[in-house]
Image (cartoon, rainbow, N blue to C red):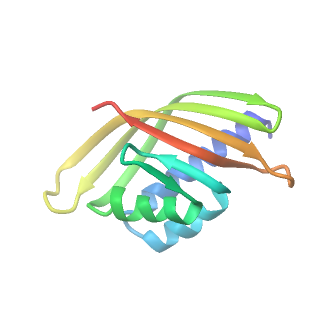
């Protein structure tokens, strides 16, 4: 597997874990933990979040809590690798069903992330930034 394929696979697993937040928050936390560096940070537009556990908790309680289900779809990846560091940008579209209203909502935006390769050779997410466009 190439570096860009490994990074795309990590981001795909991230999206699957975020989708799981709506139906299985504890399972989502477990799925997310190995995806992040120990000092990972995130910015979803509500201030910085630091640490893999805090990021998973924020996603499960603030992002997915009011959804019955979520489905993240990534498009147009742009991944650049420079040694043991990399950046990745994706267009994202999320469909979700709201718990209270039962409405199907669509969210569109961009992810701009950084990644680091660990001593074991595995890529991990070091920073996630989401910018909503609607």
Side (left or right) of 22 relative to 1: left
Q: Residue at x 31, y 39 (%)?
A: 107
Is residue 14 found left or right of 47 in the rendered image? right
Q: Residue furthest front?
A: 47
Which part of the image, by quadrant, shows the C terminus? top left
The residue at the point 61 percent across, 64 percent down is 33
Relative to the observer, which residue lies in front, 83 or 106? 83
Rendered position, 71 above or below 27: above
Q: Position of residue 18 (x, y in %)?
A: 46, 56
Q: Position of residue 31 (x, y in %)?
A: 58, 64
The image quadrant of residue 36 is bottom right
Quick check: 39 left or right of 59? right
Q: Is residue 83 above or below residue 35?
A: above
Circle count: 0
| Residue at (52, 67) in percent of width and height | 29
Q: Residue at x 56, y 30 (%)?
A: 89
Task: Give the x, y percent position of residue 132.
Answer: 35, 35
- Looking at the picture, how far across and down is residue 30, in whole percent? 57, 69
| Residue at the farthest left position | 101
């Amino acid at each position: 597997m190439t570096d860009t394929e490994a990074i795309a696979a990590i981001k795909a697993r991230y999206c699957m874990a975020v989708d799981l937040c709506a139906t299985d928050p504890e399972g989502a936390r477990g799925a997310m933990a190995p995806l992040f560096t120990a000092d990972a940070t995130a910015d979803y537009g509500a201030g910085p979040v630091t640490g893999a556990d805090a990021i998973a908790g924020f996603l499960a309680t603030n992002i997915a809590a009011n959804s019955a289900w979520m489905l993240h779809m990534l498009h147009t990846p742009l991944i650049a690798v420079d040694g043991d560091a990399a950046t990745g940008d994706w267009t994202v579209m999320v469909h979700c069903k709201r718990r209270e209203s039962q409405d199907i909502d669509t969210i569109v935006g961009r992810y701009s992330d950084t990644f680091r390769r660990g001593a074991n050779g595995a890529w991990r997410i070091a920073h996630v930034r989401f910018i909503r466009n609607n």
